[in-house]
Image (cartoon, rainbow, N blue to C red):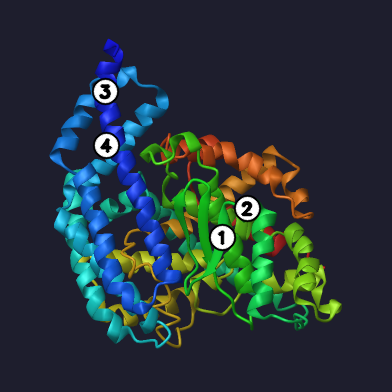
Amino acid sequence: MSPSTQQADPYARAAAKFSLACKLASIESLLSWDAQTNMPKGGAWARGEQVGALAEIASDLTGTKEIGDLLDEAQAYANLLDASERANLDEMRRLWVHRAAVPKELLVERARVSQALQATWLDAKPNSDFASFAPGFKKMMAIHKEVAAAKGAALGLAPYDAMMDEQDPGLTTALIDPIFDDLAAELPGIMAAVRARQACWRAVIPFSGDFSVGRQTALSERLAVIVGHSPDNSRIDVAPHPFSMPHSPGDVRFTTRYDVDKFRYSVTATLHEAGHSMYELNLPRALAFAPAGFARGASAHESQSLMLEMMAGRSKEFLEFLAPLLHEYFGGDKACWTAANVLNYFRRVDDDYIRVEADEISYPLHVILRYRLERALLSGDLAVDDVPGAWNEMFRKLFGRTPPNHAKGCLQDIHWAAALFGYFPNYALGEALAAQLFERAKADDAAIVPALRKGDFKPYFSWVRPRIHEQASLKSFDDIVAGASGSKLSGAALKRHLRARYLDEEFD
């Protein structure tokens, strides 16, 4: 062994530990996928024990003082490492701080409580039964407060910022609040102008055809292939709340949902989750199971799903391609499947209450609502029992209407049950980033939008793959955003996009 190899050995030993932990995390993802797609309800308690065991092992592997000492030793020889190894060392350090800050027993308990709470949520949501969800959520919030306090002390961050850093390193409330305050102030006015414009549109011609789950499933599989997936590396299943999970290189799995009365939901959900999965599929294989090989945080991930679902998927050009495809799969009267009628249907601003079904304008407002409630919950300014009333009051202020039940209100998402606290801001930040990236992509390559008229996503992915996907976590979020778009993250491009698409674009 050469002197340089001997000196760099602390890095190799640390990297091996974290690589093993990353492989265990991919197993945990597979268990979570199974819990939401195939597992019988009676298995929830055992699944909680299984996931808890993985959390315990991961903590032993990467959250001990010995690992911290090993990382210190590796840092002393960082000049011997190449750029990707130095990035990986930085990511290992970040993950170690998060894991070392929290007692292992608390991490295990969080995993157990989360599995049980997800099973409770599956029953509570369709029954609009917040009372059955609240006891488990109180347990989860007590854990979150302990975790946030421990992480905040270790990172030198406020508790909510510390929770966000785990999912979205580098993003804080100081960055988020100005963007969200600006959007909350301006989007209702844009929405009102769009409503006034759309009031003059002709009514959507009712769609006819066979909208059975079988037909929608076949269409979803076709859309995944059109985007760039193949049955060799992906699969689609059904879940109450659509999601995508990384499993291993070459194996990406996502879910969608089907409503025979509203086929649009499966189309948008499939495009959204396919966008997530394409990001995972295009991460650099050489960095598989290394911390630096992961996607660069939740907001970057959401930007990729929303670029596909909203920026590209609701473009006039793609909807022109989609219209005859819908007729091919659903049949019915050809007169209702014109490009103009399909665009009329997909572009309508809605009066619903569900984030995942929301139009492009109201979508960020749904996220801002949850973000503000989360911060109040963590600070203790909002009690769990008061969540339904607080949700309805804030919804009324932002949207001018009140959810008819908890299933369409505070129980609509699985995130709180899944222990994803501090995760929610990424959805609105992701839409803002999606608009910013898509704006730059169109400026850089004039072929991207015309290609969508033919269902061709190759020019789009040729642009985004090297700038976002292949960057993985080799750089900071800010550096990746600036490198790809030319500026730091803001809501300006999203506002330009919404005004151009919904107020300026001609409608036949």
Above or below: residue 257 compared with residue 431? below
Q: Residue furthest top?
A: 3
Q: Amino acid at mark 2?
A: His
Precedes in sequence: disc 2 or disc 4: 4
Q: Amino acid at mark 3?
A: Asp
Q: Is residue 227 left or right of residue 125?
A: right
Instruction: Give x and y (percent) for residue 246.
Output: 45, 53
Q: Amino acid at mark 4?
A: Arg
**Other-residue count near label 4 (Cα within 10 Å), few / some / many at <14 / 14–19 / ≥20:** many
Q: Secondary structure at mark 2?
A: loop
Residue 119 sits in which quadrant? bottom left
For disc 3, the marked residue is: 9
Residues 234 and 63: in front is: 234
Which residue shows up at 43% across the image and 34% down it? 474
Precedes in sequence: disc 2 or disc 3: 3
Instruction: Give x and y (percent) for residue 125.
Output: 40, 82
**Other-residue count near label 3 (Cα within 10 Å), few / some / many at <14 / 14–19 / ≥20:** some
Question: Is residue 472 visible in the rendered structure shown here?
Answer: yes
As drawn, the label of residue 229 is 2
As drawn, the label of residue 235 is 1
